[in-house]
Image: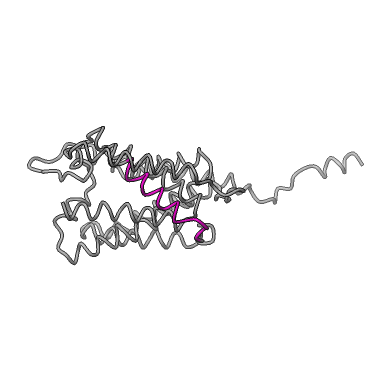
Amino acid sequence: MRELRGLGSVPSRSEDPDPSVVRRVMLLGLLPLWLSLQSLRWKRALAPQEAGFDPTPVWLERLSHLHPIWFCLVGFLFVGGLGLAARLRWPVPRPAAVPLDKAALAYLAAQSLAVLVMAPLARTSPLIQQLVYAVWMVISLWPWRHQLGLQWKPGWPGWVGAGYVLAMGGALLYGWLIHPPPSSNAAVPLLLKAGWWERCLWWVQICLITPVIEESWYRSLLSGPARGRLLFSALLFAAVHADPSGFPQLVWLGLVFGWVRWGAGLPAAVATHALWNLSVFVYLLWT
């Protein structure tokens, strides 16, 4: 009987491997490729500009030259946004987040395969590349559609309003106090030089498609209703933009959008992000 009991405790060799272990091994395999791609982007962003290249100042740099009285108003609005945000609370119990290893594996796989999808388009216009990349990332999100949290939650207008004021106020104060150098975002000069029909396509990409994709990935799958996940997703969101001068601002935006997402749902975060992008878009074209 002892031998039978002992044999009964021996695990069967036919058992399937632990799925979490498999996911972590795959993560370790994809991570070097993703890091190498990001290092190339950051190397390009940090490289000295070519002779004769005139970097186009974005709105944060322009705002540093405005009269300080305007920032009294901005500070007032920002404090008001903080007061409104302090009255809002995440739902209890908190919504469940996708396990980080699953979300990270899906993200790295989508980003790595995007290299193969984008390779034939290397010589096409950046706008076409952005649109194709957006389509690919939407396709990659399809298996996760039930985990994204697509429902509008009660009280979402308050969350959107508070999130927008916090995002705008924080960015304005950052631009005024820090005086960041010109942004390395290549889309800004392309947008300013584009014709009206191309600007319409850029508007669709920047103000509609980008908020849906980025909020779905960075604030719904990779984030969660916990400080660690919020900070991780915000840092990742800032890092993938490869914009040294805008890094602190992007971290702040990631935290604000994540706070909105887990308080009022993904659609509210998308709306907040879309309002932010629309504000920057209009400012760039009308100043």
Q: Which residues are magenta?
A: 152-170
Q: Quadrant of residue 68?
A: top left
Q: Residue furthest right?
A: 1
* Residue depicted at x 45% and y 49%: 260
> Taking 137 as reference, is 36 above or below it?
above
**Residue 158 location, x and y as percent?**
45, 52
**Residue 31 location, x and y as percent?**
43, 43
Q: Quadrant of residue 267?
A: bottom left
For this rendering, which residue is in front, 179 or 45? 179
Residue 279 is left or right of residue 220, and the answer is left
> Taking 127 as reference, is 61 above or below it?
above
* Residue depicted at x 31% and y 40%: 39
Residue 175 is left or right of residue 146, and the answer is left
For this rendering, which residue is in front, 156 or 181? 156
Q: Quadrant of residue 54?
A: top left
Q: Residue furthest bottom?
A: 197
**Residue 15 location, x and y as percent?**
69, 50
> Taking 82 as reference, is 109 above or below it?
below
Say whether residue 108 is visible.
no
Instruction: Residue 228: say if magenta.
Output: no
Residue 267 is left or right of residue 126, and the answer is right
Say whether residue 125 is visible.
yes
- Main SS category, magenta section: helix
Q: Quadrant of the N terminus?
A: top right
